[in-house]
Amino acid sequence: MHPRFSWAVSMLSIAWLSAPALVKSAGEIELNRPTQLGAEQIEPGRYTIRWQTHSPEATVTVVQDGRSVATVEAQVVEQEKKFQNTRILVIHGPDGDVLKELGFSGSRQLLVFGD
């Protein structure tokens, strides 16, 4: 094998092995009623949820029409299996709806929001 080719293959192998596993870190939700998320009130509509994990926490950004409407912290709880469907836990209380958990289809990460 040519030395340069061997070196390139070695470097690609090192880069591939050192790259983190691809983890889904975005998903879509639709809210039908005003919903509290942390200190933020989210109005009804379709949203993209993006999160950056800094284990065991994550910074979660709620995006609508390309602009951030809320940023909150969440706990990340790794599940044994990937979610087959998107899971949204909303508590309906006397003061309105509160978003407590999100788990997106194809991901093993459950986002748990505090009070």
Image (tube, rainbow, N blue to C red):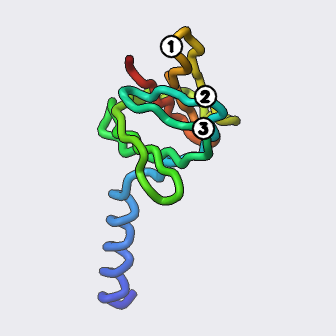
Q: Is residue 47 left or right of residue 8?
A: right
Q: Residue at x 46, y 30 (%)?
A: 111
Choose mark 1 or mark 2, whichever is in front: 1
Q: What residue would you read off at disc 2? A: 88
Residue 95, numbered label: 1
Q: In the rendered image, which quarter contains the N terminus?
A: bottom left
Q: What residue would you read off at disc 3? A: 44
> In the orientation shown, which residue stands out farthest toward the right?
85
Near-viewer residue (7 or 93):
93
Near-viewer residue (102 or 19):
102
Q: What SS does tag 2 mark? A: strand
Q: Residue at x 52, y 51 (%)?
A: 64
Residue 105 point in image, percent of width and height: 64, 40
Work out whether residue 81 can be spotted.
yes
1 or 2: tag closer to the N-terminus = 2
Q: What SS does tag 3 mark? A: loop
Q: Toward which corner of the image does residue 5 lie, by quadrant? A: bottom left
Q: In the rendered image, which quarter contains the C terminus?
A: top left
